[in-house]
Image (cartoon, rainbow, N blue to C red):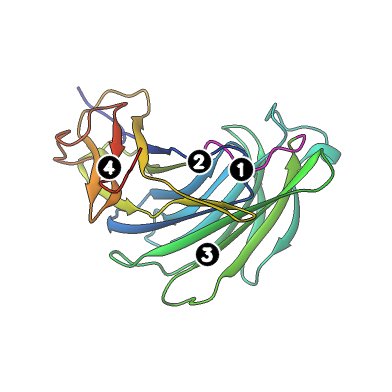
């Protein structure tokens, strides 16, 4: 059976719901053209790094329109409050509608990139989501963008990461894409929670050349190529050694 793309794989982090701030880190261990390494996905959007079809490296932060995701009237669409220098602002469609911000970002294999997402309930209707990132080239947090959307007061919940092959050219599934994620944590006022458990899931396609587990006490995801599912069964849970629950 032939497949057009490597299977998308995800980590769903065991964190409290509706928090003000989430941090996570990605360290790409193997990349290919047409790959999205999502670092902080949540119920209202996602942020991470990509390698485009031409090999160009990018950072991306997207927020969906209000829950219906059906391209609402302009007064109910995502609004961009801030965009950093060099950040391109646009709208997206297909899998729902919303606002998208992208910028060239020279991340490298083997080099950690940190993301921080902050949420502010503005008026009980709109929530502002702010994305920050840093690595060795940007030692201080860079404020990539802030976008507000209608949430009826919701903050950050449903936190996850994923690795996705969006090249889908019939050959890309033969290539390995992999990354380590951690340490994912959330903060709110004086409260700080480090994630010690994540669930491994995948999209509805059928290839079994996917895997997830722990390496250096960080969560990892692998998809494509000669990968074998030897560490964590699909829909299984991965627990760090320092989990005290």
Segment colored magenta: 152-158
SS under mark 2: loop
SS under mark 4: helix
SS under mark 1: loop
Q: Which residue is mark 1?
A: 156
Q: Which residue is mark 3?
A: 133
141 vs 231, left or right, is right
Question: How far apart are labels 4 and 2 at the CA level?
Answer: 27 Å
Say whether disc 4 or disc 3 marks the residue closer to the N-terminus.
Answer: 3
Q: Could you tell me which quadrant the N terminus lies in?
A: top left
- Within-10-Å neighbours for mark 2: few <14, some 14–19, many 20+: many
Q: Nearer the viewer, residue 191 or 40?
A: 191
- Within-10-Å neighbours for mark 4: few <14, some 14–19, many 20+: many
* Residue 169 belongs to magenta span: no
Q: Position of residue 23 (x, y in %)?
A: 50, 55
Say whether disc 1 or disc 4 marks the residue closer to the N-terminus.
Answer: 1
Q: Which residue is mark 2?
A: 159
Q: Which residue is mark 4?
A: 172
Q: Could you tell me which quadrant the C terminus lies in?
A: top left
Question: How far apart are labels 2 and 3 at the CA level?
Answer: 17 Å
Q: Of the residues tagged 2 and 3, which is closer to the observer?
A: 2
Q: Check if mark 4's residue and mark 2's residue have beta carbons within 8 Å.
A: no
Question: How far apart are labels 1 and 3 at the CA level?
Answer: 17 Å
Question: How far apart are labels 2 and 1 at the CA level?
Answer: 7 Å
136 vs 126, left or right, is left
**Quarter of the view holding residue 27:** bottom left
């Amino acid at each position: 059976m032939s497949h057009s793309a490597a299977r998308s794989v995800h980590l769903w982090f065991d964190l409290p719901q509706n928090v003000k701030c989430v941090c996570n880190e990605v360290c790409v261990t193997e990349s290919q053209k047409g790959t999205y390494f999502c670092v902080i996905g949540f119920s209202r959007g996602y942020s991470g790094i990509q390698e485009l079809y031409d090999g160009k490296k990018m950072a991306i932060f997207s927020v969906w329109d209000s829950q219906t995701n059906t391209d609402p009237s302009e007064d109910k669409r995502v609004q961009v409050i801030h965009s950093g220098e060099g950040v391109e602002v646009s709208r997206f469609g297909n899998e729902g509608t919303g606002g998208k911000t992208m910028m060239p970002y020279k991340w490298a294999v083997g080099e950690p990139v940190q993301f921080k997402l902050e949420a502010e309930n503005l008026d009980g209707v709109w929530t502002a989501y702010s994305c920050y990132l840093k690595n060795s080239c940007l030692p201080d947090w860079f404020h990539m963008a802030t976008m507000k959307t209608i949430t009826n007061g919701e903050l950050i919940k449903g936190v996850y990461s994923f690795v996705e092959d969006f090249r889908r050219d019939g050959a890309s599934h033969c290539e390995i894409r992999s990354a380590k994620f951690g340490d994912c944590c959330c903060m709110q006022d004086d409260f700080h929670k480090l994630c010690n458990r994540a669930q491994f899931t995948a999209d509805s396609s059928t290839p079994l050349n996917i895997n997830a587990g722990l390496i250096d006490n960080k969560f990892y995801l692998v998809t494509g190529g000669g990968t074998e599912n030897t560490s964590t069964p699909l829909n299984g849970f991965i627990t760090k050694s320092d989990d005290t629950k």
